[in-house]
């Protein structure tokens, strides 16, 4: 019975992590699409004449202040602040670190309210936070750190299931935390090592150590 409960916990943690990563990836995709739209609009506008009477050169202080505020909010979306978000925090505590988030989904099942908030940083970088009954249960980041790992296939093959993250770090160095989820007193972490050429390795840990490892195009 205990083994079945542990299996159930791992399945739930995996589902939460997948949903959180999907939310972060969708945000990045939306950003790219909006950039394409802006580029196309700029091309169209270059081919259109604008009557001189319609030209306006209003460089107001309000626009400048709005830009400054947006830059300040984006500066909060950092890897350092991502690490400072802890499981169990309330939304108000999250706001003290990241500011106001954009709600991207909300549902309530059997008295448990689940809400996901999105925080857009510079470029495609973003953070997604999931709360259940106003308590953080999952966090995911995308693009907050440079892809400058130096992991090889030989390094990857040194890592075995059951190892702690501290042991992995001792062998191949520190990775970047991509996702952390906590359900039913069980916590799951995904650490990623991304090289400049896009090759990478991902390691999933729970309370008992490494459970899953995967790599792409390592040499």
Image (cartoon, rainbow, N blue to C red):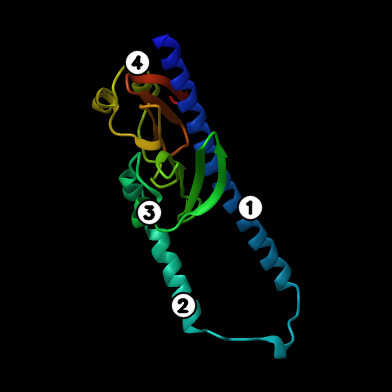
Q: Secondary structure at mark 2?
A: helix
Q: CA distance from mark 3 to mark 1?
A: 31 Å
Q: Are marks 3 and 2 in contact (CB under 8 Å)?
A: no
Residue under circle 3? 92
- Going by the picture, which residue comes out furthest to the bottom? 53
Q: Residue at x 50, y 78 (%)?
A: 63
Q: Which mark is residue 160?
A: 4
In which quadrant is the C terminus drawn?
top left
Label 1–label 2 contact, CB within 8 A = no
Q: What residue would you read off at disc 1? A: 33
Of the image marks 4 and 1, the number of the one nearer the N terminus: 1
Dot in front, 1 or 2: 2
Q: From the viewer's perspective, is the residue at label 4 or at label 2 nearer?
A: 2
Residue 216 visible somewhere in the drawing:
no
Q: Which mark is residue 64?
A: 2
Q: Looking at the rendering, which quadrant does residue 6 occupy?
A: top left
Between the residue at mark 3 and the residue at mark 2, the CA separation in whole angstroms equals 28 Å
């Amino acid at each position: 019975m205990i083994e079945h409960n542990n299996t159930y916990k791992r399945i739930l943690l995996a589902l939460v992590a997948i949903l959180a990563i999907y939310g972060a990836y969708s945000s990045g995709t939306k950003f790219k699409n909006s950039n394409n739209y802006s580029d196309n609009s700029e091309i169209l506008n270059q081919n259109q004449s604008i009557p001189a009477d319609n030209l306006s050169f209003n460089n107001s202080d309000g626009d400048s202040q709005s830009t400054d505020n947006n830059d300040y909010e984006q500066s909060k979306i950092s890897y350092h602040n991502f690490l400072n978000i802890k499981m169990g925090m309330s939304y108000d505590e999250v706001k003290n670190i990241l500011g106001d988030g954009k709600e991207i989904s909300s549902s309530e099942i059997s008295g448990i309210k689940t809400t996901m908030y999105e925080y857009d940083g510079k470029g495609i970088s973003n953070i997604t936070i999931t709360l259940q009954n106003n308590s953080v249960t999952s966090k995911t980041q995308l693009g907050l750190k440079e892809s400058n790992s130096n992991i090889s296939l030989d390094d990857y093959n040194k890592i075995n299931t059951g190892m702690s993250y501290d042991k992995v770090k001792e062998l191949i160095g520190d990775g970047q935390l991509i996702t952390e989820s906590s359900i039913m007193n069980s916590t799951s972490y995904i650490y990623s090592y991304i090289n400049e050429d896009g090759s990478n390795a991902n390691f999933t840990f729970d309370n008992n150590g490494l459970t899953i490892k995967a790599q792409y195009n390592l040499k």
